[in-house]
Amino acid sequence: MRTLAGYALAGYWVALFVATHVPLPPKTFAHGTDKSAHFLAYAGLTLLMGTWMCVRRPEQSRGRRYAVIVGVLSLYAVLDELLQIPVGRSAELYDAIADWIGIAFGIVCIAVAERISLVGADRRSGDEGMCGDETFQRGSTGSQVTNPAAPSPKSPQ
């Protein structure tokens, strides 16, 4: 699964880079309609990167994983826009904003999928769910509740 996720991410990212750096004839997109393409492209890239990170380092906390994804892809979105200038395409702030909204949507989708997986894992008793994360819900007071089937952390000796 790790290799498949890595190849899918790499292939998609390369295809996205090529697609965004091929000079386009004028009026290829109606004014403003390319924003949905930016949104969808980066939402897909976020989902693939999230999947790859999940299978590559399942012990990594969700917060750290989300921060890495948002940081890397947000920076790439800006670089992607700037690198289009040398090939005769325009760099537009609104394109980057559409990319960032796609990244945020992808993160929300990942969080929902992990939440569903972890709650389902609790019902299956002992299965840790997506990414091997032991925490699956927050109690009404906001305190973290952990999977009772997961091993407890070792106390310092």
Image (cartoon, helix red, strand yellow):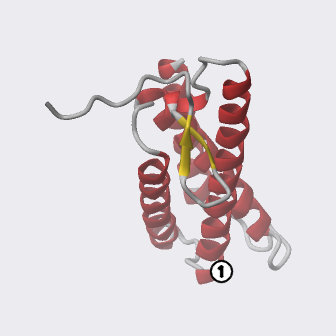
Q: Which residue is mark 1?
A: 94
**Which part of the image, by quadrant, shows the N terminus?**
top right
Mark 1 residue type: Tyr
Q: How many marks?
A: 1
Q: Is residue 11 above or below residue 23?
A: above
- Check the image and name the residue furthest to the left: 157
In percent of width and height, residue 72 lies at 42, 57
131 or 22: which is nearer to us? 131
Q: Is residue 42 above or below residue 86?
A: above
Left or right placement of residue 121 versus residue 134 in this view: right
Label 1 sits on a secondary structure element that is: helix
**Which part of the image, by quadrant, shows the C terminus?**
top left
In percent of width and height, residue 75 lies at 43, 65
Left or right placement of residue 132 versus residue 140 in this view: left
Q: Residue at x 40, y 28 (%)?
A: 152
44 or 127: which is nearer to us? 127
In percent of width and height, residue 31 lies at 82, 79
In percent of width and height, residue 20 lies at 59, 58
